[in-house]
Amino acid sequence: MNEKFREEFDSLLSNYTELLLGEENEELNEKVQVWMLYSFMSKNMPGLVKHWNAKFPDGKQTMIQIITEIKKINEMRKQNQK
């Protein structure tokens, strides 16, 4: 990938993270990116994700923590907007 595209995509990811969570930083951007990829893969290749979950139970637990954190931050943002 060329650098210009990478910068443009990073901008998109940053905007998405901020809209989703009400804030953005490098760590949150990375977590949102991992969450999006995992969600996409689990819908399109559930067998692969199920195999990965079984093969890497620690990775599965980390993924659960990331998903839980994203949902919690998103819910708090929604509540604060009311």
Image (cartoon, rainbow, N blue to C red):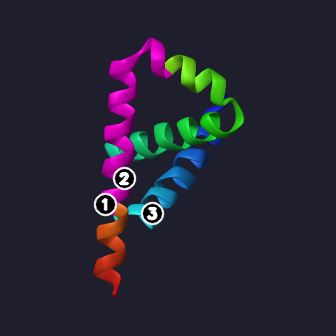
Labels 1 & 2 near each other (Cβ < 8 A)? yes
30 over 76 or under it: above or below:
above
How crowded is the residue under tag 1: few (<14 C-alpha within 10 Å), some, or many (20+)?
A: some
* Quadrant in the picture for the N terminus: top right
Q: Which mark is residue 73?
A: 1
Residue 70's disc number: 2
The residue shown at (41%, 46%) is: 29
Where's the C terminus, which quadrant? bottom left
**Residue under numbered circle 3:** 20
Check disc 1 and give the amino acid type.
Ile
Q: Is residue 31 above or below residue 45?
A: below
Q: Nearer the viewer, residue 35 or 25?
A: 35
Picture coordinates of residue 55 (x, y %)?
46, 12
Under mark 3, the amino acid is Leu
In the orientation shown, which residue stands out farthest toward the right?
44
Give the mark, 2 or 3, whose residue is nearer the N terminus.
Answer: 3
Residues shaded magenta: 53-73
Mark 2 and mark 3 residues within 8 Å of each other at the beta carbon: yes
What amino acid is found at the position of numbered circle 2 in the picture? Answer: Ile
Residue occupying image coordinates x 35% and y 41%: 66
Instruction: Give the image location of residue 36, x and y in percent.
Output: 54, 44
* 54 w.r.t. 28: above or below: above
